[in-house]
Amino acid sequence: SMGLSLAAFTLQPTARPNYVLPACLLALSLLWLGAGAALGGRANHWPDMRLDAGASLLLVGGLSLSLELAVRLVCAGRFGGFPAAFDFGLKCKEVHARSFDVPYECEPNSSFLPEFNSFGHCVQGGLSILLLPPVEAAAASAGAPRLPPRRPLVVLLSSLVAVYPAYNLVKRTVTYPVHSFATSSFANNAAEWAMGF
């Protein structure tokens, strides 16, 4: 991950650099190094991480989507994008206008732009942390001891992690014709969610 971060940093385009991908990869490297240092290299000190069936299905779905996005990002050059800059190429929509000169309207399709939606997608993916049993137990029992346990609320919040990918898929499928789905904003929005995941 640290090597990928360095490669993504050095391969940035000069025209429109976007240092989010190298920063995210570096943050993941540091988190893994910190977790390893906190455990002191002792594998038997990991907390019990057995997941229930629902959490397992959500994690498998999220990891499958992340793999699909990694493949799409590697192919970004075919769409005029640049993988190291988290640029998926152009996103194009058919224009239903009277002029037949320009049948498509295209704009850049980059992830992690400085806007609220990018942050929101990432936070929604971050709800997956509630799927881990130690975090779920801590969140359910946090607060004053006289409060009732809040496990149903925590389970509801953690299940919301699956809402955005489903919404994103349905919206892009309905909005874009079948032949132009690859150039929709599905990939960049899902990548923001996956980084939070």
Image (cartoon, helix red, strand yellow):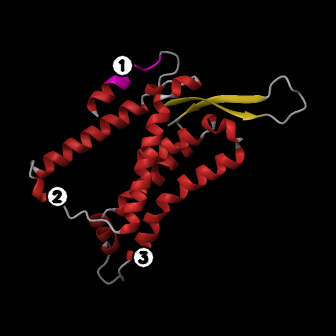
Name the spot of residue 18 as percent of width and height, x first.
Answer: 47, 27
Name the spot of residue 192 as percent of width and height, x first.
Answer: 48, 43
Q: Which mark is residue 46?
A: 2
Residue 105 in view: yes
Residue identified by numbered label 1: 10
Q: Nearest the camera: 161 or 173?
A: 173
Region of the chain picked out in magenta, as a range: 7-13
Could you tell me which secondary element the residue under label 1 belongs to? helix
| Upstream in sequence: badge 3 or badge 1 | 1
Badge 1 amino acid: Thr
Badge 3 amino acid: Pro
Residue identified by numbered label 3: 152
Disc 3/disc 2 C-alpha distance (Å): 26 Å
**Left or right for 97, reference 145:** right
Name the spot of residue 32 as percent of width and height, x first.
Answer: 23, 44
Name the spot of residue 67 as percent of width and height, x first.
Answer: 42, 42
Q: Nearest the camera: 43 or 13?
A: 43
